[in-house]
Amino acid sequence: MKNVWIPGVRFGPFEFGASVIPFVESGKVVLGEFQTEDPTETEYKSTDGRFELTAEKSKIVSVSVFSDFFYKSKNLIGLSEDEAAHSVDSPAIYADGIIYDDNSVTYPLEWHDLGLILWVEEDRVIYATCYSPD
């Protein structure tokens, strides 16, 4: 089954605003290594390492995906920046890059109206973060 993103609604089985508890109880996600400073938010990661969830008061607010992020039958992970930008229905907002210790630069392309951020490094989408834009 493909992990399909439906803007503002869900990514794969993860519906925005739904409880994360069934996924924890089933063992599909576990507590993440890094937690936010906000005590109402909790980070989770999938047991296979393919995605991370952020939940606020146990409700799913965002999903970060590292492989298999399908939108309109196209996997956006691995596409060039240009291909990815043309695969989404509205213009992206470009932001400044983040420079890491190894001097790599990752920068976001954001579609706030759709609830999507594509993270680009060396002209390739390396992961996606989706959320409800409400």
Image (cartoon, rainbow, N blue to C red):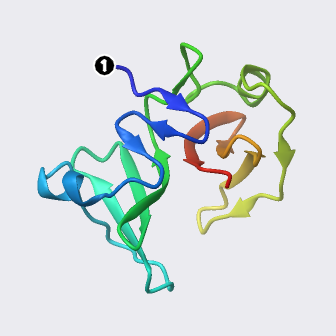
Q: Which residue is mark 1?
A: 1
Quadrant location of the C terminus in the rendered image: bottom right
Indicate left or right for 88 with 24 as reference. Answer: right
The residue under the point 87% across, 34% down is 91
Image x and y of residue 21, in percent:
23, 60
Image x and y of residue 99, in percent:
70, 64
Indicate left or right for 120 with 2 as reference. Answer: right
Residue 111, picture quadrant: top right
Indicate left or right for 12 with 80 as reference. Answer: left
Image x and y of residue 35, in percent:
40, 77
Indicate left or right for 93 with 61 as reference. Answer: right
The residue under the point 40% across, 28% down is 3
In the image, residue 98 above or below residue 93 = below
In depth, the one of 69 and 8 nearer the eye is 8
Where disc 1 sits, the SS reads loop
Quadrant location of the N terminus in the rendered image: top left
In the image, residue 108 above or below residue 68 = below
In depth, the one of 21 and 48 nearer the eye is 21
